Amino acid sequence: MSDIRPIGVFDSGLGGLTVVHELREALPEEQLIYLGDTLRCPYGGRSIEAIKTFSREITTFLMKQNVKMIVVACNTVSAVALDDVMEIAGDIPVLGVVGPGSRAAIHTSVDRRVGVIGTKATVRAGAYGNGIRALDDRVTVYEKACPLLVPLVEEGFIDSKVTELVLEEYLDELIDLGVDTLVLGCTHYPLLAKPIHRVLGGRIEVIDSAWWTARETKQILTDRNELAVTREGHDRFYATDMTDEFNRQASIFLRGQMDAIIEIDLHNELNEIQ
């Protein structure tokens, strides 16, 4: 049986578009609805209560779009507000990026020494460390904040010498600690896969949480008999604020041109729902 309802995806900004890219690759027949909360981005410096409120608002909006599943393409929300999303979603399955990345790290690591790189907020929350240790408490997890990588990606320094030098500075410590697996704990980081692999020199397995999230999404929909057989309609992209740089950055994350972006006032949308 084919279920043509769309998949809802959201992030605090544009980084979650790397998850959209992987979903398109893994599930080409599915329609996607993406919301980037660019007005209130980044979430990292916000209180937990604020992040929970934002997440509940966005989930309410996506549910109004009659989605069949919600993918939380935000490490911060996945770390502190996934239960809130699930509460609003009800019977609709919810998948955050932290779970798939953590599970992949457990299956990949031989020496049980896992490194995680992410934003300061994700590392401070201990999202991946807690997730990995909950699955296997014998694993030693080293988490490293890499605050310079997000602005490098957003400025288009994807495969440059300066980016490689910054990565060397960040990753040398994890290499010295003997990790055999590295989790990319930020949705921006898959775009840096080439320089990351060069710095690691093939010595360490790299886990792209976006790639694994797409595969788990497909498995969940398969198990629920809710895969779309044919595509119905175009993907829809929403943002809560548009800037001059939006289209350029969005095309970087999607690795190509994207469909028209619709700017929305989320509070007005929620008032209409009520």
Image (spheres, grey):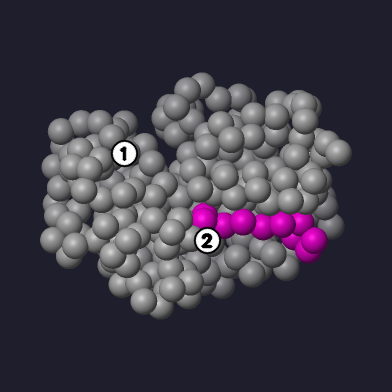
Image marks 1 and 2: residues in contact by CB distance under 8 Å? no
**Relative height, residue 192 to residue 11 (above, below):** above
Q: Badge 1 is on which residue? A: 192
Residue 87, given in percent of the width and then of the height, sits at: 73, 68
In this rendered view, identify the residue nearer to me: 212 or 241. Answer: 212
Disc 2 residue crowd, few under 14, some 14–19, many 20+, Cα 10 Å: many
Position of residue 11 in the picture relative to residue 175 (left or right): right
Which residue is found at the position 25% from the left and 50% from the top? 204
- Quadrant (top left/top right/bottom left/bottom right) for the N terminus: top right
Tell me if 32 is positioned left or right of 250 in this view.
right
Left or right: residue 42 versus residue 180 is right
* Count of number-bearing discs: 2
In the rendered image, is residue 260 in sight?
A: yes
**Percent x, y of residue 155:** 31, 34
Q: Position of residue 194 (x, y in %)?
A: 28, 35
State the residue in front, 28 or 42. 28
Magenta range is 89-100
In the image, residue 95 lies in the stretch drawn in magenta: yes
Q: Quadrant of the C terminus?
A: bottom right
* Relative side of 107 to 30, left or right: left
Q: Nearer the viewer, residue 178 or 84?
A: 178
- Which amino acid is tagged 2? Gly
Tag 1, which secondary structure?
Answer: helix
Image point (70%, 34%), residue name: 30
From the viewer's side, name the closer residue of 192 and 245: 192
